[in-house]
């Protein structure tokens, strides 16, 4: 293969488990019917991830609380995201379709926290001040594998209770303790918060490999720590995957905070980039190049350090202040390092290709993806196609991946 990168567009087939999220949530919310909502202020958590139905689910939660006689408001529950400012976190919610107008209730955004006494832990416990002053709190989050560690509790309601609702202050405390903080302190803090009587329960969401909502479960506060691990197992079973585990160059059209907490999902690319933590042996990619940053990232390019080469287009969109606030809180500095910068995508591919050793001409193993969340259609080189032809649908190709100006071609052929 020459460096024009002529690839075939193929479709992978995953299990499509899409449900009517609204109809399912309507039934599930009845599990909270024994809570005395009437006249009580209820804080509803809204995070920063690109969850498919997050705006609809959040609005439905707001409506349910009001129908039960409660007084709902929304608070950002996203740790240090949004530049760790109240205004920045509102901007993140706006990008997700969550505004006061669309939700029909106030959004109370603040980085102020209350310290919750009596935990008896080695670190203090904090909660968003507006949420703590409310009569009750309802969490909402997707259950999925975490980008930094793997254990019984990863991304989910427990994390929302501990890190998200604790704002930057709690996020800094937990991340400051490294993997011990994430694996051990996070569940301890979550248990303390859930036992405080402040949290009513949570809406757990699981998505399938197509980014569809496949499961919605309402859990009472007393059920979250017991039930969440089983939901995490379901999320693991329904992750999308690359068609092969070994390749020379992975071309990624875009990374972003709405794609993964670190821009590109480490489970997909096999790079966790945490000192002291072993990389996966399953996925082996010699070089990764990334072309662009999603608009929904608001300049936070955390995760570009997982790549080997990026384009000038991506680099020029980086808002280093917001990215540094996020990475300094996480303490995982490698993920914010700047890779080699190329003029455009064609040069980025050329640089990545040069960094691969031992490639036989015509035997290059190249894959191009939109991002690490959407893997149903991907571009693959002929060598890879020869190995997966029986398990994929060939849509078109071979197609040169670069235009005359060096930019990537589109996906419609």
Image (tube, grey):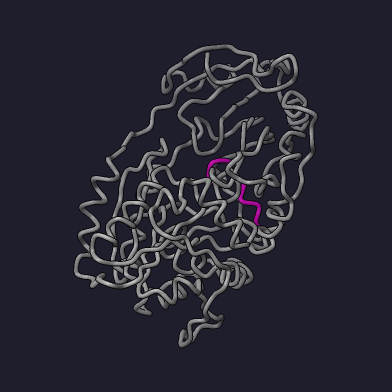
Residue 404 vertical placement versus 183 (above, below)? above
Q: Position of residue 391 (x, y in %)?
A: 41, 23
Q: Give the side of residue 294 with respect to residue 1, left or right.
A: left
Q: Residue at x 43, y 18 (%)?
A: 393
Q: Give the side of residue 407 with respect to residue 78, left or right.
A: right
281 or 338, which is in the foreground?
338
Q: Position of residue 188 (x, y in %)?
A: 45, 75
- Quadrant of the frame with the N terminus: top right
Q: Position of residue 211 (x, y in %)?
A: 42, 39
Q: Tell me where the magenta segment starts and ends, as one range.
A: 267-274
Q: Residue at x 80, y 29 (%)?
A: 343
Q: Residue at x 35, y 50 (%)?
A: 57
Q: Can you tell which quarter of the image residue 363 is in? A: top right
222 or 383, which is in the foreground?
222
Q: Is residue 270 visible?
A: no
Q: Is residue 105 visible?
A: yes
Q: Can you tell which quarter of the image residue 400 is in? A: top right
Q: Position of residue 273 (x, y in %)?
A: 66, 52
Q: Give the side of residue 216 with respect to residue 74, left or right.
A: left
140 or 110, which is in the foreground?
110
Q: Can you tell which quarter of the image residue 401 is in? A: top right
The majority secondary structure of the magenta stretch comes to loop
């Amino acid at each position: 293969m020459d460096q024009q990168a002529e690839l075939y567009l193929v479709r992978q087939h995953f299990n499509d488990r899409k449900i009517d999220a609204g109809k399912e949530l309507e039934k599930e919310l009845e599990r909270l019917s024994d809570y005395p909502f009437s006249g009580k202020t209820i804080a509803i958590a809204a995070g920063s991830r690109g969850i498919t139905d997050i705006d609809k689910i959040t609005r439905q939660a707001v409506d349910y609380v009001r129908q039960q006689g409660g007084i709902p408001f929304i608070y950002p529950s996203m740790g240090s995201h949004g530049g760790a400012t109240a205004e920045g976190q509102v901007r993140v919610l706006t990008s997700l379709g969550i505004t006061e107008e669309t939700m029909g209730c106030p959004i109370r955004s603040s980085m102020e926290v209350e310290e919750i006494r009596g935990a008896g832990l080695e670190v203090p416990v904090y909660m968003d001040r507006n949420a703590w002053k409310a009569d009750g709190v309802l969490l909402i989050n997707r259950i999925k594998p975490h980008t930094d560690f793997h254990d019984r509790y990863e991304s989910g309601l427990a994390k929302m209770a501990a890190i998200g609702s604790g704002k930057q202050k709690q996020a800094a405390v937990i991340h400051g303790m490294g993997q011990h903080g994430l694996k051990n302190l996070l569940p301890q803090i979550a248990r303390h918060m859930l036992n405080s009587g402040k949290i009513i329960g949570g809406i757990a969401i699981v998505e399938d490999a197509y980014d569809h909502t496949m499961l919605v479960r309402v859990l009472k506060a007393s059920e979250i720590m017991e039930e969440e691990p089983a939901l995490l197992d379901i999320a693991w079973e329904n992750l999308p995957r690359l068609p092969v585990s070994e390749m020379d160059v992975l071309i990624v059209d875009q990374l972003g905070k709405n794609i993964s907490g670190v821009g590109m999902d480490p489970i997909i690319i096999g790079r966790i980039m945490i000192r002291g933590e072993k990389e996966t042996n399953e996925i082996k990619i010699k070089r990764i190049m990334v072309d662009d940053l999603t608009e929904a990232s608001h300049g936070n390019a955390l995760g570009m350090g997982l790549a080997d080469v990026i384009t000038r287009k991506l680099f020029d969109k980086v808002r280093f202040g917001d990215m540094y606030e996020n990475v300094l809180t996480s303490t995982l500095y490698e993920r914010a390092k700047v890779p080699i910068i190329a003029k455009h995508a064609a040069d980025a591919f050329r640089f990545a290709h040069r960094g691969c050793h031992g490639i036989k001409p015509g035997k290059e193993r190249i894959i191009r993806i939109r991002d690490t969340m959407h893997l149903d259609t991907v571009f693959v080189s002929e060598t890879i196609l020869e190995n997966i032809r029986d398990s994929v649908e060939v849509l078109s190709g071979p197609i040169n991946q670069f235009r005359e100006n060096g930019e990537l071609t589109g996906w419609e052929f």
